[in-house]
């Protein structure tokens, strides 16, 4: 029994069509992605033995890392590597397409690093990945993410022995 | 690697064919709920873990939480 009620994709197709129309109208560089292949990788081992990483698209980075480029309409497909033992007080949120007020008040609202550590401490998951990843979600043309950044992030995390990735938006 | 997504826009998540996602009716910028509510944040993280353990096929579920103080 899952937590939550299953949604019907048919109820959301029109919403996406309108979204694509809106983006195309407002961003000349827009190039909405079409995903053909449905991925579904079952858990390789119990969660209590799994290593878990966070990947956030909320524009999260450390105060001594280069902020994401938000002055351009082209977006920024780069990513920041965040050590697991970071100080949450040093997290910054560079993103102009959502209100960062809540994240600034409590980083766990978009990057639940303290909650992840609690899940390790009480045995719900095996371990936290030594590194997590911050990205910035505003990319009217996501091609560089699909072709460059996402494979690089996957390779990085696989190299750290990560079994499970939790993806969180902004 | 297995993935689970927290989701604020199910139409986009369906179009991206994410393997598993949990939709919350929260405003952008608040995917794990309200600031200063660690209990709510942990509950939602645990819901994502449960979805990883129970989903047998691709899909998006809606979590039952509601935003009480729309910004």
Image (tube, helix red, strand yellow):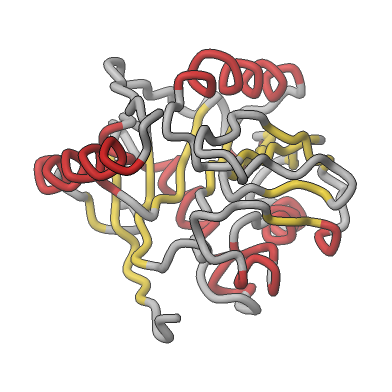
Q: Position of residue A17 (x, y in %)?
A: 17, 39
Considering every residue shown, the one lying at the far bottom of the view is: B69
The number of callouts visible is: 0
- Residue A15 horizontal side relative to residue A116, left or right: left
Rendered view: A143 above or below B67? above
The residue closer to the viewer here, A29 or A126, is: A29
Tell me which residue sits at (54%, 76%) in the image. B34
The residue closer to the viewer here, B27 or A139, is: A139
- Residue A71 horizontal side relative to residue A117, left or right: left
The residue closer to the viewer here, A30 or A36, is: A30
Tell me which residue sits at (66%, 29%) in the image. A78
Q: Position of residue A2 (x, y in %)?
A: 33, 52
Rendered view: A9 above or below A108? above
Tell me which residue sits at (31%, 21%) in the image. A35
The answer, for residue B46, to whether it is visible in the render is: yes
The answer, for residue A48, to whether it is visible in the render is: no
Rendered view: B56 above or below A95? above
Q: Position of residue A97 (x, y in %)?
A: 49, 55
Image quadrant where residue A81 sits? top right
Rendered view: A37 above or below B49? above
Image quadrant where residue B1 sits? top right
Q: Position of residue A148 (x, y in %)?
A: 58, 15
Tell me which residue sits at (38%, 55%) in the image. B8
């Amino acid at each position: 029994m899952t937590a939550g009620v299953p949604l019907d994709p048919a109820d959301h197709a029109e919403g996406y069509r309108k979204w694509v129309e809106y983006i195309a109208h407002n961003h000349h560089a827009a190039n909405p992605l079409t995903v053909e292949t449905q991925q579904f990788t079952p858990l390789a081992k119990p969660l209590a033995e799994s290593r878990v990483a966070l990947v956030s698209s909320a524009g999260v980075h450390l105060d001594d890392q280069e902020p994401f480029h938000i002055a351009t309409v082209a977006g920024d497909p780069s990513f920041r590597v965040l050590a697991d033992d970071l100080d949450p007080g040093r997290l910054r949120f560079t993103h102009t397409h959502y209100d960062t007020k809540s994240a600034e008040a409590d980083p766990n609202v978009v990057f639940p690093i303290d909650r992840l550590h609690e899940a390790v401490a009480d045995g719900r998951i095996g371990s936290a990945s030594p590194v997590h990843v911050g990205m910035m979600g505003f990319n009217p043309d996501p091609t560089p993410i699909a072709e460059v950044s996402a494979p690089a992030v996957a390779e990085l995390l696989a190299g750290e022995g990560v079994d499970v990735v939790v993806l969180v938006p902004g | 690697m297995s993935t689970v997504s927290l989701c604020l826009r199910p139409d986009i998540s369906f179009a991206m064919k994410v393997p598993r996602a949990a939709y919350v009716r929260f405003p952008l910028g608040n995917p794990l709920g309200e600031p200063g509510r660690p209990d709510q944040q942990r509950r939602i993280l645990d819901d994502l873990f449960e979805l990883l353990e129970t989903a047998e096929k691709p899909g998006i579920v809606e979590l039952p939480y509601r935003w009480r103080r729309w910004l």
